[in-house]
Image: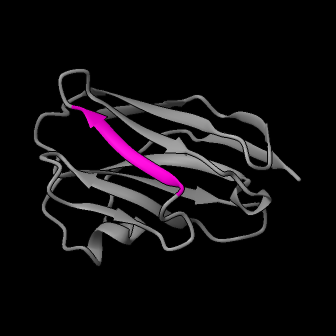
Amino acid sequence: QVHLVESGGGLVQAGGSLRLSCAASGSTSSHYAMGWFRQALGKEREFVAAMSRNGAMILYADSVKGRFTISRDNAENTVTLQMNSLKADDTAVYYCARRGQFCSNYECQQEDEYDDWGQGAQVTVSS
């Protein structure tokens, strides 16, 4: 069983930055990738970014490419999402997720392919 806890959400003005972290505990050694998803009020959850354990696979949604950066520290079992140049459209609850087995680039962008989820962290960007 894996337990994921997000932190670092909050309120920021448009153009500002926030850094989200996800700490994993439990049986974390065998996972393939960690991802970030978000869900805005009234909308479906959508893919944001993903990164494989060895760093060879890094994916971003087109809407965040060039503004967000995903990184991880395997020794600390943490994955981080640095969010810069934030826009009002980035307002959402952000979730980190763990994928245990290999996934293709397409699969790693699908929420149904992830095995464990955090509770979410609210990010609010004021315009």
Q: Which residues are magenta?
A: 67-73
Number of numbered markers? 0
Residue 99 seen in render: no
Q: Quadrant of residue 7?
A: top right
Residue 43 seen in render: yes
Q: Position of residue 42 (x, y in %)?
A: 78, 68
Q: Nearer the viewer, residue 59 or 95?
A: 59
Residue furthest toward the top?
A: 76
102 relative to 78, above or below: below
Residue at the image point whose x is 53% and y is 35% from the top: 20
Q: Position of residue 2 (x, y in %)?
A: 29, 34
Magenta span contains residue 70: yes
Residue furthest toward the bottom?
A: 106
Q: Position of residue 94 (x, y in %)?
A: 58, 48
28 relative to 52, above or below: above
Q: Nearer the viewer, residue 11 or 28?
A: 11
Indicate left or right for 42 with 27 as reference: right
Q: Nearer the viewer, residue 37 or 26?
A: 37
Q: Quadrant of residue 83?
A: top right
Q: Position of residue 93 (x, y in %)?
A: 66, 49
